[in-house]
Amino acid sequence: MKKYLYLLVFISICCADLSAQSYAFGLKGGMTAATQRWNNFDSGQPLISYHGDIYIESWNEENLSAIFASVGYHARGRAIRTRRTVGLNGEDFPSRTFNQRLYNAALIIGVKKKIPLGNDNKRGFYGFGVRGEYNIKTDLGIYDGFNDAVNKITYGVTVNGGFEFMFSEFIGGVFEISIHPDFGKQIFVPPFPNYIDPYTGVRRTLPEQNVVNTSIEISVGLRFLHKITYID
């Protein structure tokens, strides 16, 4: 985690220099809906979880473009929800939810464009970034046999948009919706004979699995402006 913090500090220095030493920084977090795509296998339903970031971006009062960077925790994975069923002999099988969670540290670097909304205290924005993630911990539940198949590093892109608003000259807030599709495989499982199905206990051949994450996140946060004013 330290290497990501060191990189964020380096990026902040670069951003500050690019924007005449003025920049904005803050923290944000919120809800995550994480999904996964499995090959020839039940991909489940969205995992509802949370995320959090610290971020920094270049700032210039006369420039509506900015460079940004963020680092933080992002949940990935899926949920498998079963319905209540009744067996042939009258057995009652209640509905259950199996959460499969990956605890990832994410670093995002990108650019954003701001849109004036007729009010100096409020702006819209949209942005695009590249993203790298490192898996810190894995909890695959009933599929814990796949733990060794989890790739520590994955990557993708981030597309976001939202609003920035100021409470005062130096303190504001942010509301953001972002989509995070991965290009790298989070899990890779080669064809596996004699696989024991955790639901039925039946042995079968599991086809090759290339598991890719896609997540949607809603964030709210605080924004602090570090403004440098030159006096002649």
Image: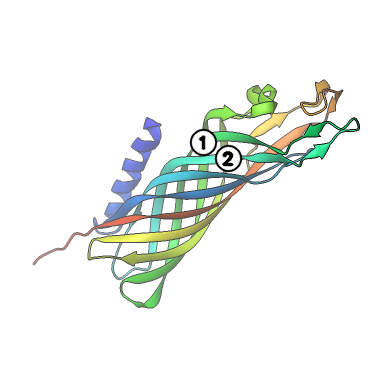
Residue lying at the far front in this picture: please name it. Answer: 90
Q: Amino acid at mark 2?
A: Arg
| Residue located at (43% from left, 45% from top) | 52
Q: Is residue 60 above or below residue 182?
A: below
> Are dots 2 and 1 in contact, CB under 8 Å?
yes
Q: Is residue 27 above or below residue 115?
A: above
Q: Quadrant of the C terminus?
A: bottom left
| Residue located at (31% from left, 47% from top) | 12
Q: Amino acid at mark 1?
A: Asn
Q: Residues within 10 Å of mark 1 (few under 14, many from 20)?
A: many
State the residue position of label 2. Answer: 76
The image's mark for residue 31 is none
Q: Position of residue 39 (x, y in %)?
A: 78, 39
Q: Is residue 48 left or right of residue 70?
A: right
Q: Position of residue 88 (x, y in %)?
A: 91, 33
Q: Quadrant of the N terminus?
A: top left
State the residue position of label 1. Answer: 104
Q: Quadrant of residue 231?
A: bottom left
Cα separation between marks 2 and 1: 7 Å
Q: Position of residue 224 (x, y in %)?
A: 27, 56
Whether residue 131 is visible to the viewer of this picture, yes or no, is: yes
